[in-house]
Image: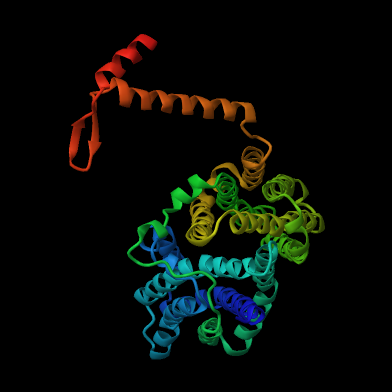
Amino acid sequence: MNNGRDIAAMLTTTFVTWMGQRTTAVALPLVALAETGSAWSTGLVGGAVGLPMLASPWWARGLRQRLTSGRALAWVLAVQVAGLLVVPVAAAVGTVGAPHLAAAGLVTGCATALSGPAQRALLADIGDSLGATVATKLLTWQDFLHRSTMILAPPVAGWAVAVAGPLPLLWAEAAGVGAGALLLLTVRGTVSVAPPDRPADAPALRHVLARHADIRRAVTMSGVGGLVWFAFTLGLAILGAQTGRPGLLISAGMSGYGLGSLAGALLAPLLVPRMPALATMATGWALLGVAFMVLPAVASSLVLLSCVAAAGGFCMPLGIGALNRLISTQSSGPDRRAAFAVESLVHDGAVSIGLLAGGAVIGAVGAGPTLVTAGVAQVAVALLAGPWLRIPRRFRLRRTSRVATDEGRGDVRAAAGGLGTTATGAGRQRVPGTDRARRQHAQAR
């Protein structure tokens, strides 16, 4: 197996697919508006994409355990290409409508709900075969490529729309994802595929969280961060409009955040493997919360606002890298694939819920108070879910010994003080000597 080639293929696929998604985010609303003439249709694809993700704990449980090789992932990307082609093909025919937009969103949503977590799990599997910290470094480099598209894609999309219109970008994304599928065909898996008739190999997402306490804490922080993300995006946009600077605050904030996160992503492969994972993630989330709280106070200066947003953005790649490290080091096989899936589900679902309700929240309490409250929430969850608030060891030992004692008493009762029977394959049978054992047990009590 050529691990270097496999890693290059997977990282290239990440970059190409995310560039396509971010450029299409600029082009697709323009195509939808031009073809349908309805403003509400511009968000139809994005809304439909989220539905398969929210339902993935039910329909994707067994499928995600089959995605253990590049060939399997290539088939998923092929389905995504089919979904991406719905709108440009319909536009070429001249019949784009709401059903086409909804169908495109549902098909691509099903594919992305599977491919994103599966790519991270497969990359971590490859890293495990190369060294103890290689998986963490590979996942941080993948996150860096993902974040670099935040900076590169918008100007590329703007130039392409100005030169040739938005429709060619939709064809380009489908071609890019298709190229990624071809690259993944060469990537071999490092673990065996789970047989479809073994449900134990497809753990429920809630069971994975129950088994891994640190992952559960990290996913909780990620979910709260996703839920309040609207305070940054919608909050700065509305605050700028309210202060007579429409578009300026959100542009400064997003630019600063993007540059800061890119700088953090460059250092993450070096820093994340050397720092305690849960503490690193909690610190990053807390510092982002502090940045949220400070933003309204510095909104009068675009430079200061950009710097504060950059400081918050710098912490995020370290926190996300720490989350990926927790999953890659504390789980493997089916649990690892399920853990990456539940992290995506919780975070992306929380972002969708936050954006859905965020406008009403900001309208009720104002943009500034919403930012401050969102910051307080992130600091609070970082303190509660971080490594600092733990059950003292003596209480854990006392509780464990009490449970063991209770279980021992239960065993004695079952053997000596019960009905004098035991369950066998043929039914319940009398156990010789249980009357004497029951009397001895009563005297002991």
Nearer-the-camera pick, 330 or 368: 330
Nearer-the-camera pick, 208 or 147: 208
Horizontal side of residue 60 vs 245, given as left or right: left
Residue 22 is situated, as x and y percent measured from the top left of the image, at: 59, 73
Nearer-the-camera pick, 80 or 257: 80
Q: Image height check: is 368 above or below 236? A: above
For the C terminus, the image quarter is top left
Residue at horizontal 44 percent and vertical 64 percent from the top: 47
Give the colouring mode of the picture: rainbow
Residue at horizontal 74 percent and vertical 66 percent from the top: 262
Residue 428 is situated, as x and y percent measured from the top left of the image, at: 19, 34
Q: How many marks?
A: 0
Residue 307 is situated, as x and y percent measured from the top left of the image, at: 80, 57
Residue 77 is situated, as x and y percent measured from the top left of the image, at: 48, 78
For the N terminus, the image quarter is bottom right
Q: Image height check: is 159 above or below 293? A: below
Q: Can see residue 9?
A: yes
Residue at horizontal 58 percent and vertical 30 percent from the top: 396
Horizontal side of residue 71 vs 302, given as left or right: left
Instruction: Give residue 186's quadrant in the image.
Output: bottom right
Which residue is the extreme one toward the top? 443
